[in-house]
Amino acid sequence: MEQITRVNHLGIRVFSLETSRSFYEQLGFKFLVGPVGPEPVAIMEHASGVNINFILNAAAPTDSNVLMDEPVKKAGYTHVALEVNDMDAVVAKLNELNIEITEGPVVFPTGSSTFIRDPDRNVIEFHQPKS
C-alpha cells in the first residue's frame, strides 16, 4: 500500500506503568501522557521519533515470553529492532545500567545486534546496520 509512510507507534502490553516507564526512561524514552482511554494506555517517545504505547492490562510477568520461550511457537510479533549507530556504546551503556544482555552482540549479514528483555520479558533488539 503506497500510502504507508512509516511506523507510527509500537503497542506493548505491560503489567506496571511505573516499572515499564522507569525501564524505558533508562533507554532515553520520555513520558508523554497516560493512562488514558478505556484500555488504558500510556505513551512514551524517544527523541528519534520512536513512540511506544503501553497497554496497561497485562497479568503479572513470568519468567518466560509466550512467543519466544515456549517450545510450541505461536504467531505474533516477537521483538522490536531499534536501529543504533554505535553498538559498542550501546553495550557499554547497557552494562552501566545493569541491564542484562540476553544475546549478543551477534554479527549478521545485515549488521550486528544485541538483545535485551524489558521487565515484562518483551524482546528489544539494538541493530547497527552493516556499513
Image (cartoon, rainbow, N blue to C red):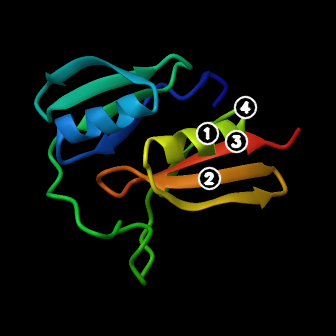
The label on residue 113 is none
The answer to whether the residues at label 3 and label 1 have Cβ atoms under 8 Å apart is yes
Toward which corner of the image does residue 121 lie, by quadrant?
Answer: bottom left
The label on residue 85 is 4
**Residue of label 3:** 87
Q: Position of residue 78 (x, y in %)?
A: 48, 58
> CA–CA distance between discs 4 and 3?
7 Å
Seen in the image, is 23 located left or right of residue 100? Answer: left
Q: Is residue 49 above or below residue 96?
A: above
The answer to whether the residues at label 3 and label 2 have Cβ atoms under 8 Å apart is yes
**Residue of label 1:** 90
- 35 or 28, which is in the foreground? 28
Which residue is rendered at x = 59% and y = 25% of the image? 6
**Residue of label 2:** 114
Q: Nearer the viewer, mark 1 or mark 2?
A: 1
Q: Position of residue 52 (x, y in %)?
A: 38, 31
Seen in the image, is 5 located left or right of residue 25? Answer: right
Q: Position of residue 74 (x, y in %)?
A: 42, 71
Seen in the image, is 85 located left or right of residue 78? Answer: right
